[in-house]
């Protein structure tokens, strides 16, 4: 058994962790007030993975969520005290080989306005939208019969 590779980032309302395990099975995520316990079987070799993290601060275990995809397991840990920055994920300052900062999603949120939809709400919205729906987004003017484009001229019949 070995730990799964993980990336994390901090937001005003929550902390996000992505465990990068392809084709995961038997996923178990346990949220405790000060600890996260993650385990699964996954990867091309069906190896067992287990991660136990003593968290930097307390979370709300009842309001924390996780979502399994084909490529990873994404966890949203709702902070017990929103608006408080976490300089690291773990309680101890020790470097964990399996954990790194997700700089693609990292953001200095302390300067942001509160008018924006919170990250937790966006995460929840994203989770609700995930699934097999084939709806395409609305494209402005795509259904307008009156819009004439230069390449909309009638094509000559083929002989």
Image (tube, grey):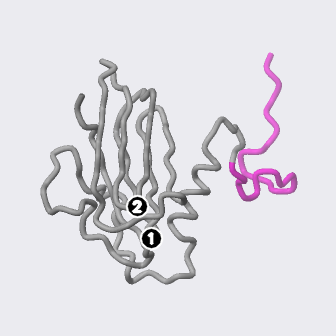
| N-term-proximal mark, 2 vs 1 | 2
- Callout 1 crowding tier (Cα within 10 Å): few <14, some 14–19, many ≥20: some
**Pick the front one: 118 or 137:** 118
Assess whether mark 1 and mark 2 are in contact (beta carbons under 8 angstroms).
yes
Secondary structure state at the residue bearing disc 1? loop
The residue closer to the viewer here, 70 or 67, is: 67
**Label 2 residue SS:** loop
Q: Separation of disc 2 and disc 1 at Cα?
A: 8 Å
Is 75 on the left or on the right of 48, as rendered? right
Residue depicted at 43% across the width and 75% down the height: 81
Question: For residue 148, what is the image quadrant?
Answer: bottom right
Q: In which quarter of the image is the C terminus?
A: top right
The answer to whether residue 44 is above or below residue 30 is: above
Query: What's drawn in magenta, residue-wise?
Result: 137-159
Which residue does the image show at 51% across and 44% down from the upper left?
67
Other-residue count near label 2 (Cα within 10 Å), few / some / many at <14 / 14–19 / ≥20: some
Instruction: Judge whether 1 appears above or below 56 on screen.
Output: above
Disc 2 vs disc 1: which is toward the camera? 2
**Which quadrant of the view contains residue 14?**
bottom left
Please state the horizontal and vertical placement of residue 111, each as a whole percent of the image. 39, 83
Q: Is residue 100 left or right of residue 155?
A: left
Residue, disc 2: 33
Q: Which residue is drawn at the image coordinates 66% and 35% (left, top)? A: 132
Magenta includes 158?
yes
In the image, is residue 11 part of the stretch drawn in magenta?
no
Residue named by callout 1: 80
Image coordinates for residue 143, horizontal then vertical, percent? 81, 51
Q: Is the magenta stretch mostly helix, strand or loop?
A: loop
- Residue 85 rendering spot, x and y as whole percentages: 33, 75
Residue farthest to the front, as pictured: 33
Q: Nearer the viewer, residue 19 or 105?
A: 19
């Amino acid at each position: 058994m070995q730990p799964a590779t993980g990336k994390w980032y901090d937001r005003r309302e929550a902390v996000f962790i992505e465990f990068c395990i392809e084709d995961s099975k038997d996923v178990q995520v346990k949220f405790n007030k000060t600890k996260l316990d993650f385990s699964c079987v996954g990867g091309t070799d069906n190896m067992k993975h287990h991660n136990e993290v003593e968290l930097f601060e307390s979370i709300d275990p009842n309001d924390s969520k996780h979502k399994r995809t084909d490529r990873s397991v994404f966890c949203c840990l709702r902070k017990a005290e929103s608006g408080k920055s976490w300089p690291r994920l773990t309680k101890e300052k020790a470097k964990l080989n399996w954990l790194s900062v997700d700089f693609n999603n990292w953001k200095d949120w302390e300067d942001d306005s509160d008018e924006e939809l919170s990250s937790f709400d966006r995460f929840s919205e994203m989770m609700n939208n995930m699934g097999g729906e084939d709806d395409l987004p609305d494209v402005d003017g795509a259904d307008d019969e009156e819009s004439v484009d230069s390449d909309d001229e009638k094509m000559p019949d083929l002989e």
